[in-house]
Every structure is written in C-alpha cells, then in structure tokens.
C-alpha cells in the first residue's frame, strides 16, 4: 500500500514538473512574441482595453436595468397592495365574532383572489400575479389565511406596527426556490389588528435579467472578436510596409545595391519609402565612386 502511494506521489510530482516546464516555455514564447511583434502587441493591448471597457459598460447597463425593473415592480406592488387593502377593509368592517374570524379571512381571501383575477384579465394589474395572505396573529396564530409561513418575521413586525413595508425574500417550497417581493400593510377597519400581505413572484423579472445578461455576454464577446479583427487588420496595414522595408534593408546590406522599395500613394509610409530609396541611391552612388577610385 505504501509503495502504491509513493508511486502515485512520484507520478503526480512528474506531472507537476512537466506542467511547470510547459508553463514556463509558454511564458518565454509569449514574452519573445511580445518583444518582437508589433502587430501582436497592438492587438493584445486593444483586446485587453476593449475587454475592460465592455465589462464596465456591461455592469453599468445591467445595474441600471435591474434597478429600473425592481423600482417599477415595487411601485406597482405597493399600489396594488393599497387597493387590495381597501377591498379587505370593506369586507372586514365591523367584525366582532372571534370564533368565525378564520372563516371570514378565508372568504375575504377568495374575494381578493377573484378580484385580482378579473383585474389581470382586463390588464389593470401592473404588478402581475400575487398570493394574498391575511393574518390576525402572525405565523404562530391559527387566525390566518394564506401561506403566512412565506412572510418573514421582520416584515411582519413592520405591518403589526401599522406600517406599509416591503421586502424581497426567497422561499424554499419543497425544493423549489422562489423569490418574492412581499408587501405588507395593516387592515384598520376592524377592532382586532389584522395584517395583509401580497406576495409577488419575481420570476418574470429574473428571466428578463437573465436574458439581458446573456445578451450582454454574447454581444460583448462578438464585439471583442470584431475589435480584435479590426485592430489586427489595421495594424497589419502599418506593419507590412515596415517589414518590407526591413527585408529590403537587409538585402541591401547583403550586397544587393539595386534593392528599392515600391512607392504607392502619398502617405507617411510612401514618404518613408521615397526617403529610403533616395538614401539607397546615394549610398550606391558613393560605393560606385569608391570602386572606381579603387580601380584607379
């Protein structure tokens, strides 16, 4: 057993050494290419800077979209909650029989659900579908209607203090995690404190954000590929004449005195070619004079 462990450790060590050697060779090759290739340096720099710009713009745009979606959802949810509170107050006004309270809450809950279904059918609900909850004593009370266990305790304390409050809360229901925007408000038309909560699923907003993220990711990658290709093409237009000039200079230094650069256009590179040709012609003339002097 010890021999097997030792052999396995030796194999791992050899693989680590090979990986280290390969990594060092790649780093050396990258450094050599970076020093010798102007085209590679410009393309890599453009890609790095473009990646930073695209990342920053993507994050800013994503945050703006998320903030706008959340704010719109919150305002519509609060307005919908206040409207439903008015319906609940009108249904629960003058309630006094405590034994019949759970039944009354269930009836009001059905009334709210049917009213909300009619509003959604007519397109009047801007906040979307919701789950209503009515309670007269919190999570531990039996005088509740609806999934009161989904409402966090912190939000219940605000509603019990006669405050309209909201909270984004994720609920794990039988292995399915759902994020809700929960708005709580007090029902003040009864002698006993009653709280109303509306749970608005954030599924549509999360899908929208996911679509935006995927679009930004794909668009950013396509933009980076295009920028890399453009920078490569533009850099090649500059590097190719420089490489031609370097090759011509090397041949001229090797003895080919008739070597000249082609001149096309009137740009900076063309003027460089003209200057090089004039210099080469002058050097060739001087060399010829020296050869004639040597012959004499």
Image (cartoon, rainbow, N blue to C red):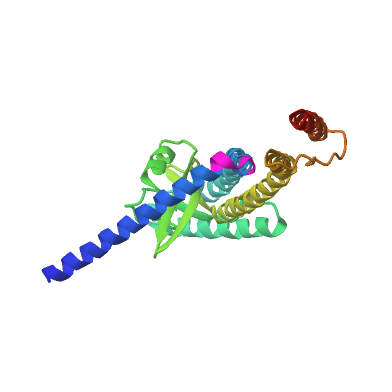
Q: Residue at x 39, y 47 (%)?
A: 152
Q: Residue at x 81, y 34 (%)?
A: 277
Q: Which residues are magenta?
A: 34-39
Q: Is residue 267 left or right of residue 251?
A: right
Q: Nearer the viewer, residue 66 or 24?
A: 24
Up-down: is 66 above or below 140?
Answer: above
Predominant secondary structure, magenta span: helix
Q: Position of residue 236 (x, y in %)?
A: 71, 45
Quadrant of the image occupied by residue 75: top right
Quadrant of the image occupied by residue 50: top right
Instruction: Say if residue 156 shows up in the picture.
Output: yes
Q: Is residue 35 magenta?
A: yes
Q: Position of residue 95 (x, y in %)?
A: 46, 49
Residue, far right: 265
Q: Position of residue 139 (x, y in %)?
A: 35, 51
Quadrant of the image occupied by residue 267: top right
Q: Is residue 183 magenta?
A: no
Q: Nearer the viewer, residue 21 or 195?
A: 21
Where is the C terminus found, in terms of image quarters? top right
């Amino acid at each position: 057993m010890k021999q097997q462990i030792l052999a396995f450790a030796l194999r791992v060590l050899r693989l680590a050494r090979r990986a280290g050697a390969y990594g060092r060779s790649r780093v050396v090759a990258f450094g050599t290419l970076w020093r010798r290739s102007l085209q590679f340096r410009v393309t890599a720099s453009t890609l790095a800077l473009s990646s930073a710009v695209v990342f920053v713009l993507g994050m800013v745009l994503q945050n703006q979209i998320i903030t706008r979606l959340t704010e719109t959802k919150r305002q519509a949810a609060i307005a919908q909650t206040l409207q439903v509170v008015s319906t609940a107050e009108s249904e629960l006004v003058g309630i006094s029989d405590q034994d019949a309270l759970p039944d009354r809450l269930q009836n009001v809950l059905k009334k709210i659900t049917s009213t909300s279904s009619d509003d959604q059918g007519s397109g009047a609900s801007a906040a979307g579908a919701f789950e209503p909850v009515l309670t007269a004593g919190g999570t531990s009370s039996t005088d509740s209607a609806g999934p009161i266990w989904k409402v966090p305790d912190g939000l219940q304390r605000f509603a019990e203090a006669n405050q309209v409050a909201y909270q984004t809360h994720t609920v794990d229901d039988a292995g399915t995690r759902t994020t809700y925007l929960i708005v709580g408000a007090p029902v003040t038309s009864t002698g006993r404190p009653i709280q109303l909560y509306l749970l608005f699923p954030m599924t549509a907003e999360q899908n929208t954000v996911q679509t935006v993220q995927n679009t930004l990711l794909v668009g950013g990658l396509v933009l980076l590929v295009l920028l890399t290709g453009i920078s490569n093409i533009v850099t090649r237009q500059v590097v190719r004449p420089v490489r031609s000039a370097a090759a011509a200079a090397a041949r001229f230094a090797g003895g080919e005195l008739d070597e000249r650069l082609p001149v096309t256009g009137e740009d900076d590179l063309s003027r460089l070619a003209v200057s090089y040709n004039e210099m080469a012609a002058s050097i060739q003339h001087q060399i010829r004079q020296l050869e004639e002097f040597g012959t004499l």
